[in-house]
Image: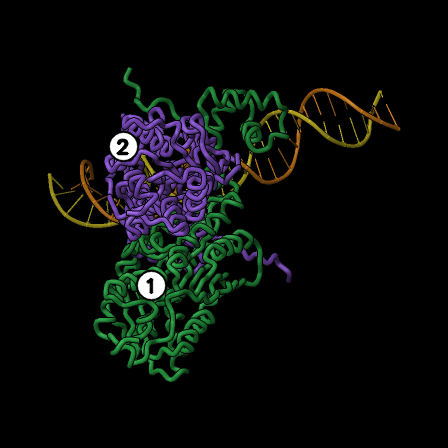
Chain colours: A green, B purple, C yellow, D orange
Amino acid sequence: MNRPMRTRRQATLASLAAELGVSRTTVSNAYNRPDQLSPELRKRVLETARRLGYPGPDPVARSLRTRKAGAVGLLLTENLSYAFRDPAAVGVLEGLALACEDAGVGLHLVPAGPGREDVAAVHRAGVDGFVVYSVPDDDPHLAAVLQRPVPTVIVDQPSVDGVDRVGPDDETATVSLANHLVGLGHRQVGVLCMRLARDRNDDFVPMSRQQDAHYHVQRTRLDALKRTFEAAGVAWESVPVVERFEHNVDDGASAARQLLDSYPRVTALICTSDILALGALAEAGRRGLRVPADLTITGFDGIAEATRAGLTTVHQPVLEKGKSAGKLLLGAADRVAPKVITLPTELRVGTTSAPPRTAEERWFGP
Amino acid sequence: MNRPMRTRRQATLASLAAELGVSRTTVSNAYNRPDQLSPELRKRVLETARRLGYPGPDPVARSLRTRKAGAVGLLLTENLSYAFRDPAAVGVLEGLALACEDAGVGLHLVPAGPGREDVAAVHRAGVDGFVVYSVPDDDPHLAAVLQRPVPTVIVDQPSVDGVDRVGPDDETATVSLANHLVGLGHRQVGVLCMRLARDRNDDFVPMSRQQDAHYHVQRTRLDALKRTFEAAGVAWESVPVVERFEHNVDDGASAARQLLDSYPRVTALICTSDILALGALAEAGRRGLRVPADLTITGFDGIAEATRAGLTTVHQPVLEKGKSAGKLLLGAADRVAPKVITLPTELRVGTTSAPPRTAEERWFGP
DNA sequence: TGAACAAACCGTAACGGTTCAGAAGCCAAT
DNA sequence: ATTGGCTTCTGAACCGTTACGGTTTGTTCA
């Protein structure tokens, strides 16, 4: 009497058909094409299904047969906390999720753990396409995605041959921010940036590392700053750049501290993200520096909290970015030429930027 | 010469085996059990695969056979912006994603659009289990999930028979918050809460709606407040409660405005989320009310921005919540009794709560 | 009366893998 | 010469479904 505890096997479409004395096709049609069978029979099928505890066609088997998984994969940077703690990244995620929702497809977050070279997860993901968001350009997961025979869209990354791409016009935006500062009269500036490569470096950044940065967005922004300030006569080698691996307000504050400790005479702190800038604001307050009177601080991204704080920053439409990526991917069937979407950005001057105090003011007060 | 543009069909495991003159089993083993064939043959297989552009075993077919999808589904509330704009919800999402990453499984966000009765997405999701987060208890998607023959964990929701559950100890937390306010001497309070049901009501909330709230968390918090204040001699019917459908700082501010316009004499504003509380803070500032001298404001959740703002709030370990749910689900194989995890919460008194001003002070200043 | 056609249902062949119980070959030990 | 054990590879069954191209039955209309 000790039959295996696991009660009887789950009912399948076939067993249901057998029970009913109809063909499998008919049962399938009962679920997928109600017009293909009489209402009475359909009702009988559905009722028997309920009685037998048949939960409806198995999604995996269906996917195999129809060659549609009903989901798009999202590959994000190795470090999840980075993605979720940054409102800008969350905005992209939300936009993408919205696009997926509109299309009725799921969004599959691919587990690409830090240090995990386990590309298998990419291979295991049953999806109809991938969105790749801000991973370093030498990431093995990215390579694995590109091998999969499904459409792919990359976001905030350098273009890959033949692959759709969505990105902000970081170039222009950064230049306008830099010009804003130059115009105010700032010449002694410092930069706080996010991680530039997969190896950790919570410290000042030599020129070589700036140029070799594997994170496209950071590289672009640094490049544009460099060019603009050099055009204004500032020797970029003399501009201190501090990097932080983790991306949160506390690290922004510690980066600001490190920079200001060594370079107390900078008049402006340019941060490559709002989160870092919020940290810098906190540190400035701690030091008794008034912003913007004593120190100008700027951010990047235009997240809500930054706006509330009055931060001067570059706003980019993060939600749109995610949405565009989703639409691009979902509409990618049989397109020939790869498409590139560049989103507009906008300089938003807040209350954290002002002309630098003159040397005299610095020593004797206004 | 116009062969169909879509080059030849994708290579499959079978075609690869044919090309190599070996059995399908062997090719499969080359990928999954390297010890089952000679290294030379394996190398040959992999090389030929590369040459033919075979991207490795199809994930869907594999899933069908192995009966493992390698992903868990996440069903969240109808409205995505709600989920993504609330740092507390994002924290849960992050924790869940972390747990999935640890286990090497994907996280599949199920598209459950607002107003979309389209439960099909739940049926279409190829997943090994579901986490259901904070959906109203009468949501059809939830019912659909429970029909699927896979393990499920529900988070921040009333328990369902035989289903694992993770939730904060909202009860105790709310009581301690309420007692804090009672202890300070507050008797004329107002409440700002999030949506209570699926229908929109951006207005004051009658008792009946409070009791019938379909969102478990909100209902629990309101209940606990009611009980505690009534124990302190406050007639709950006289306590104004304002509801907002959307969950963001601006709506928090407008809710505060609405409440204070009608009840200018309340000495404390209790918000059922930090986001709403931040809005209330902004509105207080706009009115020239000093916090906490003129008005006490409290939140709920303990998000980072609230901490930075010094908000008195109830902190709950959101990251842990998500992680626990993930672990529970992923370790759920063959467990007998459903498990319930209750997470500790903690009252964090900040700088936004203080004793109410006496009537005299209110009129003549301190 | 029978041709034409629509509605309702069915049989077979995939879809692309994994798995398990062997078979074949080889070598060492009995 | 037999036995046993090991490595390497194979054949066939199976996973649960849907696509495709039928067949059967009944109704309409000339």
Tell me the quarter of the picture where residue B211 sits. top left
Q: Position of residue A351 (x, y in %)?
A: 39, 65
**Relative to residue B242, is residue A364 depicted above or below?**
below
The residue shown at (35%, 61%) is A139
- Residue at far top of view: A1
**Could you say whether the residue bearing mark 2 is in a helix, strand or loop?**
helix
Tell me the quarter of the picture where residue A40 sits. top right
Q: Position of residue B167 (x, y in %)?
A: 30, 34
Task: Check chain identity for marks 1 and 2: say if they share one.
Answer: no
Q: Is residue B169 visible?
A: no
**Could you say whether the residue bearing mark 1 is in a helix, strand or loop?**
helix
Please indicate whether residue B327 sits to the left or right of residue B127 in the image. left
* Marker disc for residue B175: 2
Which amino acid, by three-letter code, is at mark 1? Ala
**Relative to residue A304, is residue B145 depicted above or below?**
above
Which amino acid, by three-letter code, is at mark 2? Val
The residue shown at (37%, 40%) is B72
The residue singled out by tag 1 in the image is: A277
Q: Position of residue B13 (x, y in %)?
A: 43, 49
Where the N terminus of chain A falls, by quadrant?
A: top left
Dot 2 alpha-carbon crowd within 10 angstroms: few under 14, some 14 to 19, many 20 or more: many
Where the C terminus of chain A falls, by quadrant?
A: bottom left
**Front-most of B257 and A302?**
B257
Count of numbered circles in the view? 2
- Closer to the eye: label 1 or 2: 2
**Are discs 1 and 2 less than 8 Å apart at CB?**
no
The residue shown at (33%, 70%) is A293
Chain containing the residue with disc 2: B
Chain containing the residue with disc 1: A
